[in-house]
Image (cartoon, coloured by chain):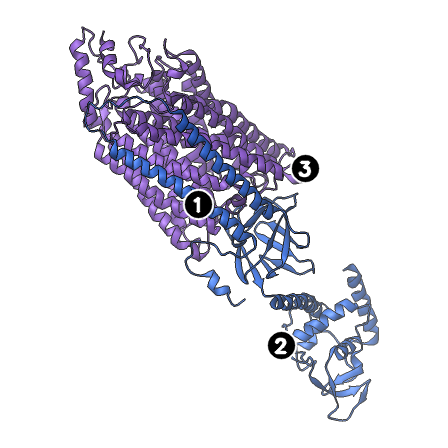
Chain colours: A purple, B blue
Amino acid sequence: MSAINLDRRVVGEAASTHEATPKPATNYLNHETTIASWLLTLDHKRIGLLYLVGISLMFVLGGAFAGLIRLELMTPKGDLLTGDVYNKSFTAHGVVMIFLFLIPSIPAVLGNFLLPIMIGTKDVAFPRLNLLSFYVYAAGGVFLALALLLGGVDTGWTFYTPLSSTYANGNVMVAALGVFVIGFSSILTGLNFVVTIHRMRAPGMTWFRMPLFVWAMYATSLIQILGTPVVAITIALVGFERFLGVGIFDPRLGGDPILFQHLFWFYSHPAVYIMILPSLGVASELVSTFSRKGVFGYHIIACSSIAIAIFGFVVWAHHMFTSGLSQYAAMVFSVLTFSVAIPSGIKVFSWLATMYKGSVSLASPMIFFFGFIGLFTIGGMTGLFLSTLGTDIHLHDTYFVVAHFHYIMVGGAIMGFMGGIHYWWPKITGRMYNETLAKISAALIFVGFNFTFFPQFFLGYMGMPRRYHEYPEELQVLNVLSTVGASVLAIGYLTPGIYLPFSFFFGKKAPKNPWGATTLEWTECESPPSPHNFDHNPPVYDHVYDYSTLNKEAAVVSH
Amino acid sequence: MMVNSMFAEGFQLFPHQASTLAPSVDWLYLFIVAVNVAITVLVMVLLVAFAIIFRRKSEDDLPEPMHGNVPLEIFWTAIPTLICGVMFLWGVKVWSEIVVPPRDATELYVVGRQWMWKIQHPGGQREINAIHVPVGSNFKLIVTAEDVIHCFSIPDFRIKTDAVPGRYNQMWFNATKPGKYHIYCTEYCGTEHSRMIGWIHVMEREDYAKWLNEQAEGGDGLQGRKLFSKLQCITCHSDANKAPLLENIFRKDREIGYMDGKPVPPGTKVLADEAYLRESIRNPNAKIHRGFASPTIMPAYDRDLVTEEELLQVITYIRSLKQGETPTRTEETPTPQPITSADKASSNATEKTSGSAK
């Protein structure tokens, strides 16, 4: 409400000095309406929406598997699912959520939609590659769906050898091929973004005038380009071993199963940062806009995203402290892992400092931001138990780890994604959603999430191993609590699935800049944007988060 | 042993501290918990406080821009770095306790396979999905796997190590509290992963010594039981009409009918000790139980048929035979025909062949 008033003020002032430039009647949503115009679009905004539909479906699918897991764990005995079905469920949950939802979530949806607009350009550097990336993603999804339909895969999303290369039943190679293909989608998107950021910035958009979301996307893209090929190579090696009998990972053929873990985590640990860095970027945008204040320590936050991306590549072996790793190597990886904690901590403190003496609005995206801070902080802090060698041995492969990474990858990443979707929804659709429902959804997610995953820290310290279909009776109370929490969480996640689509058709028309933000997509673009984003090169002559010029800028725009 | 039941049941929030390593790990854990709580509470309180104190009061609010504060930023970089440094060093200290076994530790071998743990004691005792150890002794586990990667974990001892095919990983413990504690496989290993579990039984020293002996007996007894069928003892000694049952006879008096083929006066008794049992197997006609014929149809099991070691095993088995425990005869052990001297020679020959093939 309040934010809308602000916008009216700005727009009103602008309109009074506005000359004869009529508001463009067409926007990217309505200028073409055929199905082909969507499926073959080269518009980064439409591709972003194609991804949004894709990942939303995948989120529901992955969530359904999570539901099966939590229902099974209501009782200590394996009475709902057989062991085999249970194992296939958590494998499907992990694979779908990570490769088909989390990795593409923010980069491919919000990144695609916003990155070109935020740096003041009309599209990404390679629009056709962008569309190809979507279809590569879809093709990978088809392989994974095929693997599920053929009977599922029971290796866990980590595909550890020699279980995956020799012993597993199911359709490992079909699923692995799916992951292999999806990897290329990720690489193409990352490549596109890096080139776009390097080559397509509007005049005046220097590196340190870029919004922090763009910095986060840049760091993410670097990981996608450098890390993903390694997992592709690893999958290819598993294929060689399985089909050609070349001994790489299987000790009976002279291979080393631990080698697989090194290669796998060399990608998959940085992949965690592919999932969380974009959310950190979103958080910076949210806290600035809703505190009406530039992000505290802008340069340090920008650089810390890059630092996290770089450090993320040298911590992989902390997944392997119990595997018989050399004791000196373990110490090195422990130190390096701690080094990731520092830039993450700096970000959290800087966000708090941004709110300090700010003008804090409690609009729904900010409520999601609060939830994000809460979950990300718990997730990050509990990582300290796992980087500390003395405690990791006990906690390794227990529910403590499950809770920790869900706090980061689900709590943090999805809360950030939700915050971003709610923040940019008016820009994307040109409509406002129901604020009250949005706040209720944020609260349900926060409460449900903590009820689901906080008990798992206790389960983990008690020693409950991951991926257990059955467990000892003394652990039932905490497991039931977790399942009850998961039901609340599910309602929290599904609520936006109702009011957001509803608002798309029936919501109040959104003004150009409902939140009073300073980045180009709000100040220079209509809601929803025109097919080519801008009618002119957007003027960039000042620091990105300069709220003092908000009104002046509006006047300048209107000439 | 008696505390077992109270460990397996009831609601807990913290694992048992059952090894010397557990308190070390727990103190470190609680230190990190304290740091976690302090920082998380600080962040949450500031978040809520700032949201309330600095909430937007009017639409015209325009806060002063603030781009940074170098001392503050140095402060919140340096303090976490320092805290992380302490955690790292403390972590390395505890971890070096965990990974370096004492030199005097008794070695146990642990082999994981889909889906069971096989344990081998230095005395040859073998266990599956269970380990018996005494309280207060150092044990080193040498862990490997036959098929896929497993992970041997005892949460109440705060230790685990991966069981990797083709590699030997090690871990050690010194159990401090009698009781039984969970063994889990914590590396996902296929369909029955969650059933690859077991118990470690920590026993008082004297209970453990007894267990070791029982296991030793059980080991030989088991072999003896097999021999009991293989040597066809079972064919007659399971039917009181053909031969005396051997239940509950050890260290009891036996009434004798014949000695070396000659009848003896009624009421003649001998003590059924090891020597008696041994003699009755090697040379059955030496003493015949009252009510049975002499010479007996039982063959003399000489050294070619039964080694000394096997003989001890059979005796161990007979010693352990309780009322009603005699196994029933199956198709595999048909009733033998009375053995003539010619038959005996050929039967000896066959037994020899199978014996040497062993």
> Dot 1: few (<14), some (14–19), or many (≥20) neighbours within 10 Å?
some
Nearest to viewer (mark 1 / mark 3) = 1
Q: In the depicted view, which residue is nearer to us: B31 or A104?
A: B31
**Amino acid on which disc 1 is placed:** Val
Q: Quadrant of residue A98?
A: top left
Q: In the depicted view, which residue is nearer to us: B102 or B284?
A: B102
Instruction: Please determine if labels 1 and 3 lie on a single subunit.
Output: no
The residue depicted at 55 percent of the width and 31 percent of the height is A235
C-beta proximity under 8 Å, tags 2 and 3? no
Give coordinates of residue A170: x percent, y percent.
51, 40
Counting residues from the start of the chain, the first of labels 1 and 2 encountered is 1
**Amino acid on which disc 3 is placed:** Gly
Q: What is the secondary structure assignment of the residue under circle 3?
A: loop
Image height of B315 relative to A323, above or below:
below
**Amino acid on which disc 2 is placed:** Lys
The residue depicted at 29 percent of the width and 24 percent of the height is A289
Q: In the depicted view, which residue is nearer to us: A88 or A378?
A: A378
What is the CA distance from the residue labelled 1 to the residue labelled 3? 44 Å
Give coordinates of residue A192: x percent, y percent.
44, 17
In the rendered image, is residue A53 in sight? Answer: no
What is the CA distance from the residue labelled 2 to the residue labelled 3? 52 Å
Image height of B1 relative to B138, above or below:
below
Q: Which residue is mark 1?
A: B33
Give coordinates of residue A43: x percent, y percent.
35, 16
Q: Which residue is mark 3?
A: A254
Q: Which mark is residue B322?
A: 2
